[in-house]
Image (cartoon, rainbow, N blue to C red):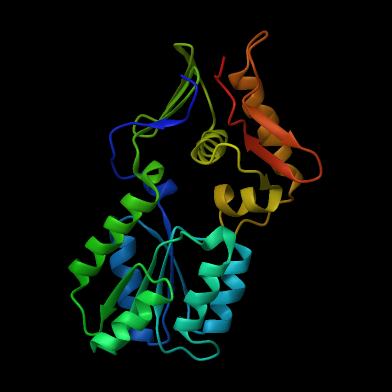
Amino acid sequence: MNEIRVATPRETPHDRAPRILVVEDEAALALLLAYNLESEGFQVEHVERGDEAEIRLAESVPDLVILDWMLPGVSGLEICRRLRARDDTRTMPIIMLTARGDENERVRGLSVGADDYVVKPFSTPELMARVHALLRRARPERVATRLVAGDIDLDRETRRVKRGGREIHLGPTEFRLLEYLMEKPGRVFSRAQLLDSVWGLSAEIDERTVDVHVGRLRKAIIRGREKDPIRTVRGTGYSFDETFGRN
């Protein structure tokens, strides 16, 4: 095969669950959202202010944002507009929460780039369904059972990796690292980005640790003269070679 492909859509394991940022200044509502999202298997972050959300989004891009319209600092409407102007967040799913229910306000929210618009008070099961639907459309690779590139086959359900039919034994960190790189072939990730996404936001690990684990991953998946699927970008980081497997 010459391209990344995904198999039958299924939900990802918890440790690779999509990350959702909740931007909501009502503490009780934010707690309710976080509880229900985590119950659905998502990783959840929460900030209360619009300016805090902008800082967090500049550090790391989540898979989806649930964004309140009225926020201290910067309004949700303005945040949505700015996110749509950025290349790395242009297509990121955004659900706008608001107490404004009239049609003109709905149109305004959608016109600045929100993918969905939910009026308070809302049905929690309905909101969860909308979250799942947006993620399926926006990031099908995040809900796929398998990732396949060339002769490398990564199965998320069994946590197994094969290359050319042979079993490759990876540690948990190397598995997550390969999985994350395969999700976005060709995209270059800095060491800080990989630490953030593979090790976790709270990880206090030196960036050079990434190099060690990339070295272990390469040693495990490459035999003899087999092509290296991981590309090192000097001074920047690593990517999964989008040309891997092509003749």
Picture quadrant of residue 82: bottom right
Q: Residue furthest right?
A: 235
Q: Is residue 64 left or right of residue 39?
A: right
Q: Residue 48, how many percent across, how many down?
A: 48, 83
Identify which residue is drawn at 48% across, 11% down. 164
1 vs 151, nearest the viewer? 1
Q: Residue 170, how many percent across, how many down?
A: 53, 27
Identify which residue is drawn at 41% across, 54% down. 18
Q: Residue 33, how many percent across, how many down?
A: 32, 73
211 vs 181, nearest the viewer? 181
32 vs 231, nearest the viewer? 231
Q: Residue 154, how many percent across, how many down?
A: 44, 28
Q: Is residue 72 left or right of residue 125?
A: right
Identify which residue is drawn at 30% across, 45% down. 11
Q: Is residue 114 above or below residue 201?
A: below
Q: Is residue 7 above or below residue 96?
A: above
Q: Is residue 245 above or below residue 69?
A: above
Q: Is residue 207 above or below residue 74?
A: above
